[in-house]
Image (tube, rainbow, N blue to C red):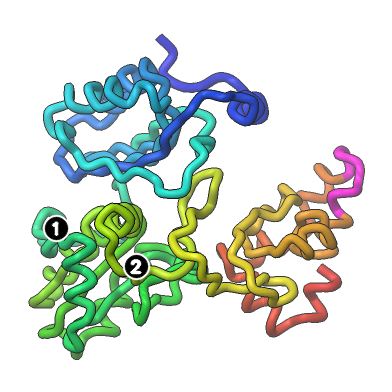
Amino acid sequence: MRLYNRVSADELKRRMQESTEERTTLSFYKYHHLRNPKLFRDHLYILLDAVGVLGRIYVSYEGVNAQVSIPTERFDAFRAALDSIEFLKGVRLNIAVDDDGKSFFKLKILVREKIVADGLDDGTFDVTDKGKHINAAEFNSLTEDPNTIVVDMRNHYESEVGKFIDAITPDVETFREALPKVAEDLAADKDKNIVMYCTGGIRCEKASAYMKHRGYKNVFQLDGGIIEYARQVQEQKLENKFIGKNFVFDERLGERISEDIIAECHQCGAPCDTHVNCANDACHILFIQCPSCAHKYNACCSQKCQEFNKLPEETRQELKKTEVFNGTKFGKGRYKAYKKTTEEQLVSG
């Protein structure tokens, strides 16, 4: 049996776009000590491929982290497949709130050192000693307390388009940067309520354990993250304290939680929260672009990338070896700072 995909990405994307099959996007994770991640990876691939699952899953000695889409009519079969694995039996599934089902186009299961890269090398840190889980209603109540600090454990380009009201949003590009920064920035607040949140819960589960490890007393995490919060708010008719979009790591790049647009186009400054990747594959930088600028720059991040894309394929392949674009200069979402401080370079590339 083949335990990986052999069809080209372009072909798989074409099939997905043309498909009329109803699909559901969801995520799940579980910290669990796995003795043989490679063997578990292959077993999981066989189970999920059999029920039509597409998506990206990381497996490691510390557990599993998955973002997938499934044929909606096979949801029960998918749940049964997970339940056949003892430590995944009854695992919470975070179902997307703004979804057309075309979030993934292939099944990819990778063995990694960790299911969330944290940069930690501390044998005394126990990821299972986590903070207290709270639901949407409890989150809303706790955040009304003036003794509470809300911390966004996501990256800056995620919080740029959506966040909880009054949340601290660390200016970081990776989770491994966020952990020590948050602990250090809040060093004087160890007796306050520290409420942490992320997309689906997995990052703040580890972060809450890390904060307890660093001596913080009252640590909480939003159970199921923004995804589950949005679902509970809708179902229970609660006040929605999240404004804007929830950035997601799939083809959608975001799901709308409220109608507020809190970000702006990185090229012209117009209100906009649509993330795209530069159409120049040699650049591919992630940035925010409004429809007007997408038309003006042919979906590129700069005039240089726009002109580069007009060159013959052979020329582009040769120039890729030496040319420098925004995507080779800056990290994810850093295009905005570059644009504001060097406007001339934006025009020239």
8 or 112: nearer the eye? 8
Q: Residue 297 falls in which quadrant of the image?
A: bottom right
Report if the CB atoms under discs 1 and 2 are less than 8 Å apart.
no
Which residue extends farthest top? 1
Whether 55 is among the magenta residues is no
Task: Determine which of the numbered discs, if any, sits on residue 123 in the image.
Answer: 1
Helix, strand or loop at label 1? It is loop
Q: Count all numbered tags in the image, as a single digit.
A: 2
Whether 314 is among the magenta residues is yes
Q: Amino acid at mark 2?
A: Asn
According to the image, label 2 marks what residue? 240
What residue do we see at 24% from left, 77% from top?
A: 183
What residue do we see at 69% from left, 75% from top?
A: 270
**Span shown in magenta:** 308-315
What residue do we see at 12% from left, 70% from top?
A: 212
What residue do we see at 74% from left, 82% from top?
A: 342
Q: Is residue 176 left or right of residue 306?
A: left
- Specify few, some or many for label 2: CA neighbours under 10 Å numbering under 14, 14-19, or 20 or more: some
Position in image of residue 20 (x %, y %): 57, 24
Q: Is residue 37 above or below residue 61?
A: above
